[in-house]
Image (spheres, grey):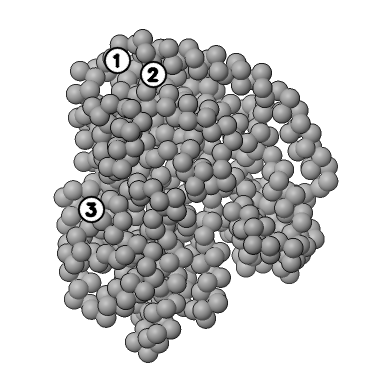
């Protein structure tokens, strides 16, 4: 039976969650993302894929967090002879023509309501922007609580750099003062159990059929729920992880007179345009992004290129802190045992090249797959013991699998699927070499990321091969704590991997030096200390 699982409004497809409803056969299903389908349409291969599958499962992490899948449903109906809707919380039912009509009806209804709603929003934003210009500098309340705001409409986020970053800050804020209160749309697996956490779920889905509107309509509800749940308790400052079309932090700071720290990992408008499916009402999204940046007393960016971007946009240097990502060296360390992971995947006695990530366009996982195949093809005898383990899931996973299949190397690679963040260290421990093969931005802009995986790799005490790109190039010293390669150059990556695979002494030395540097310079505790130190100076 041919099964395709098509994702909508989620970045990974945990097939094991679908097994109770669809049987173990679902574990062998092919997976695809909206970007995959757009690629099929673009290259003309969609025609031969029409009704090619016995079953197409349209999957989202949590249906309550997802807009109506109108276009995804049409695509699913075209790809399979039978179509079902499913999520990670027990939903599993047939997709019918009635569903399609219902989705289309809501789309038309919401389209009629959209313009007056946007007009009212414009008035509210005018008031907040006026407050930005009028309000004096806000001061921290000495006995107040730090309040962390994570307002992304993403459910069941089990792994990834954002999970590590949120937990890294939340788990260490309490070491410098009162413990934080976390307001989030979903629980995160690595935030400590003793961190007070409130989950705020959307309750009003009006206008959700219009692209970009779920986040817009949710923002003010999220802010109101934060006020209600705090119940008058004193607040020292707000800390918000910037999210597309969400201005709840700015709204609370401006209307409640609270200091605001905005964590800015890059323009979400740029991300949607370059790594996503585009963005409707881009001018409004940029306006909201600028409102958050203007309202913030301190903007924490993870790299120097992001600081330069904000300076070019006219934001003052004194409110910007460059603060790279970090790692918890007590969680990621050389003593973690990866034996069980190696045994589970048949890797005992093998030399394992590893990568962990969400298979985004910037991660370069396809380049690693190409390099591994090239290495195996050119040096089959010398690399007979070599294996590749790709940890995680995401949009580029399928193309990596197809590439390895075409090169005859698929049987030498392990694709683990999404691994919960707490299990990440054991999977990294199962690897002998860790790779960060990031590629330059396709639009020619400067690479602005601060890959969390880099610091996790370092803390594990493993030898690293990484692209000489952006912050990775600055943090790593070639031949001392890593080996660096030309970004996007498959031949250079293959050559470097082959050299490192053949030199156990070099692997040990690079890993030891990387661990030392992670402990001394790149902990989440130090990351959080820098934020609080700068905030006190800014608001004093």
Front residue of 235 and 514: 514
- Please tell me how crowded label 1 is: few (under 14), some (14-19), or many (20+) other residues with Cα within 10 Å: some
Residue at the (57%, 19%) spot, across then down: 121
Residue at the (74%, 67%) spot, across then down: 48
Sequence-first disc among 1 and 2? 1
Residue 256 in sight from this viewpoint? no
Residue at the (68%, 62%) spot, across then down: 44
Sequence-first disc among 3 and 1? 1
Label 3 and label 1: CA atoms lie apart by 35 Å
- Residue tagged 1: 138
- Residue tagged 3: 474
Q: Position of residue 387 (x, y in %)?
A: 41, 76
**Quadrant of the rendered image containing residue 504:** bottom left
**Quadrant of the rendered image containing residue 26:** bottom right
Please determine whether, in this image, residue 329 is positioned above or below residue 499: above
Q: Position of residue 155 (x, y in %)?
A: 54, 42
| Disc 2 element | helix
Q: Which mark is residue 214?
A: none
**Quadrant of the rendered image containing residue 250:** top left
Q: Badges 1 and 2: C-beta atoms under 8 Å apart? A: yes
- Residue tagged 2: 253
| Disc 3 element | helix
Front residue of 209 and 460: 209
Residue 532 in sight from this viewpoint? yes
| Disc 1 element | loop
Label 2 and label 3: CA atoms lie apart by 35 Å
């Amino acid at each position: 039976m041919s099964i395709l699982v098509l994702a909508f409004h989620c970045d990974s497809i945990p097939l094991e969650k679908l097994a109770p409803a669809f049987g173990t056969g679902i574990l062998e299903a092919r997976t695809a993302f909206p970007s995959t389908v757009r690629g099929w349409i673009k290259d003309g291969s969609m025609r031969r894929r029409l009704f090619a599958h016995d079953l197409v499962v349209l999957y989202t992490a949590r249906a309550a967090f997802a807009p109506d899948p109108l276009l995804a449903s049409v695509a699913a109906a075209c790809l399979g002879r039978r179509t079902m809707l499913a999520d990670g919380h027990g939903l599993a039912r047939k997709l019918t023509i009635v569903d399609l009509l219902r989705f289309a009806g809501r789309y038309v209804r919401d389209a009629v309501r959209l313009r007056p709603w946007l007009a009212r929003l414009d008035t509210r934003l005018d008031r907040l922007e006026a407050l930005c210009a009028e309000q004096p500098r806000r001061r921290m309340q000495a006995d107040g609580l730090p309040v962390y705001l994570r307002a992304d409409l993403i459910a069941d986020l089990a792994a990834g750099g954002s999970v590590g970053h949120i937990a890294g800050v939340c788990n260490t804020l309490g070491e410098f003062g009162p413990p934080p209160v976390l307001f989030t749309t979903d629980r995160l697996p690595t935030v400590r159990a003793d961190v007070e956490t409130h989950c705020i779920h959307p309750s009003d889905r009006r206008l959700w059929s219009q692209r970009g509107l779920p986040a817009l309509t949710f923002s003010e509800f999220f802010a109101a729920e934060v006020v209600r749940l705090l119940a008058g308790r004193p607040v020292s400052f707000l800390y918000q992880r910037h999210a597309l079309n969400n201005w709840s932090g700015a709204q609370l700071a401006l209307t409640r007179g609270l200091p605001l720290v905005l964590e800015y990992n890059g323009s979400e408008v740029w991300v949607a345009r370059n790594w996503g499916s585009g963005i409707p009402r881009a001018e409004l999204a940029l306006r909201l992004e600028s409102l958050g940046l203007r309202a913030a007393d301190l903007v924490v960016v993870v790299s120097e290129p992001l600081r330069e971007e904000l300076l070019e946009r006219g934001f003052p240097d004194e409110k910007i802190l460059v603060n790279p990502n970090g790692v918890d060296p007590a969680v990621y360390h050389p003593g973690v045992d990866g034996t069980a992971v190696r045994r589970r995947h048949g890797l005992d006695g093998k030399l394992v090249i590893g990568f962990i990530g969400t298979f985004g366009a910037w991660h370069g996982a396809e380049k690693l797959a190409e390099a591994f195949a090239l290495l195996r093809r050119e040096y089959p005898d010398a690399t007979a013991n070599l294996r590749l383990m790709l940890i995680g899931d995401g949009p580029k996973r399928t193309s990596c699998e197809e590439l390895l299949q075409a090169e005859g190397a698929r049987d030498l690679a392990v694709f683990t699927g999404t691994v919960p963040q707490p299990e990440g260290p054991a999977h990294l421990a199962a690897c002998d070499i860790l790779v960060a093969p990031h590629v330059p931005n396709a639009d020619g802009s400067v690479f602005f990321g601060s890959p969390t995986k880099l610091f996790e790799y370092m803390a594990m005490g493993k030898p690293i091969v990484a692209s000489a790109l952006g912050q990775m190039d600055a943090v790593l010293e070639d031949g001392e704590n890593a080996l660096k390669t030309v970004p996007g150059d498959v031949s250079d990556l293959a050559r470097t991997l082959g050299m490192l695979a053949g030199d156990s002494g070099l692997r040990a030395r690079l890993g030891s030096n990387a661990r030392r540097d992670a402990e001394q310079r790149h902990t989440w505790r130090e990351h959080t200390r820098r934020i609080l130190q700068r905030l006190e100076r800014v608001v004093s």
